[in-house]
Image: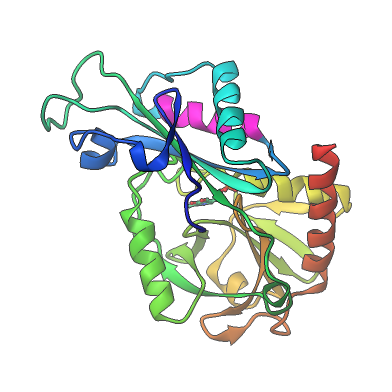
Amino acid sequence: MADALPNSLLNGVIVPLIDARISPLDRGFLFGDGIYEVVPVYAGRPFRLDAHFDRLQDGLAALEIANPHSHARWTELVHELIDANGGGDMGIYLEISRGAGKGRDFLPERGMQPTVFGFCFRLAPPKPELLQRGISAATLEDIRWQRCDIKSVALVGPVMLKIEARRRGADEAILVRGERLAEGSSSAVFVVRDGRVATPPASHERLPSITRLVVADVLDALKLPLEVREVRRDELLTADEIWIASSTREALPVTSLDSQAVGEGEPGPLWRRLFDEFQALKQREAD
Ligand code: PLP
């Protein structure tokens, strides 16, 4: 992720990031008691914003935190934040924590005021070498909790997994629960075998990825069926192509898994079609 841009959002107001102050008693800091979102913005326009707001609302409801803003107000604030940082292509990080209490009780105090914080970072298109080469991944056992459908700010599990993936020389960790594919440590995963594309279904084991839905739309536009079903670990290890998808990386081909070539060890033919149509879909939605 690129460095933060200079202006941030704090409790409904745009402020320079260096002036943004949050209490050390904030429950986001003390307990990871909050929800976040990352929204891609292309040419100053947020992409699939409503889907991100819906997921944000679901996460807040799961944590029993009242949404501090209406959908309309959120939309205004997001646009203010984009404009304050000069528009263009960027990612927006939004966090809503339960707020700061008077001390550190596990049980939240009644009537707490949530803290809202947002900042932006530049989103550069993937470098041509990366598109030519693809990325590497390591399979790791999923050590996270049992509500991975909630986009909680408590991310120490994925942090540990990313560090382990890096130690193994991999760019991403692909998580398995026993013999079943869960998801990437910060991505949805697709597997191609014999020309058929599969991705696991929504469940408590995985985040309902917005980019996964975009990839489904892209495949639909290409008239390529998508099998939504559990994917076995051995299917991963014998895949012709593997793709990961996320809001900041769109869809990328995994060309090496556990230091073994995936398929021919280069981005596959279906991924190339996916990439072109993904760009076309972004353009269509921007228009
Ligand atoms: N799964 C996990 C665990 C993630 O952290 C992310 C994104 O950060 C994704 C999937 C992809 O979600 P999205 O496409 O909404 O960015």
Picture coordinates of residue 99 (x, y %)?
28, 27
Q: Which of the pair 220/111 is nearer the observer?
A: 111
Looking at the image, which residue sits at the far top?
111
Task: Give the prevailing secondary structure in the magenta stretch.
Answer: helix
Relative horizontal placement of residue 88, taking residue 225 as reference (left or right): left
Picture coordinates of residue 215 (x, y %)?
73, 51
Relative horizontal placement of residue 139, taking residue 157 as reference (left or right): right
Name the residue at 58% across, 52% down: 122
- In this rendering, does residue 137 appear at all? yes
Relative horizontal placement of residue 59, taking residue 273 as reference (left or right): left
Number of numbered discs: 0
Colouring rule applied to residues: rainbow
Residue 267's image quarter? Answer: bottom right
Relative horizontal placement of residue 219, taking residue 79 as reference (left or right): right
Picture coordinates of residue 125 (x, y %)?
69, 60
Relative to 268, say whether 16 is above or below: above
Relative to 256, say whether 222 is above or below: above
Relative to 206, say whether 35 is above or below: above
The reply to whether the magenta stretch includes residue 56 is yes
Residue 21's image quarter? Answer: top left
Name the residue at 78% across, 46% down: 282
Residue 115's image quarter? Answer: top left
Q: Which of the pair 25/8 is nearer the observer?
A: 8
Quarter in which the C terminus is drawn = top right
Relative to 251, say whether 218 is above or below: above
Q: Which residues fall within the magenta stretch?
A: 49-61
Picture coordinates of residue 213 (x, y %)?
68, 44
- In this rendering, does residue 225 appear at all? no
Name the residue at 20% across, 24% down: 108
The reply to whether the magenta stretch includes residue 7 is no
Q: Which of the pair 251/146 is nearer the observer?
A: 251
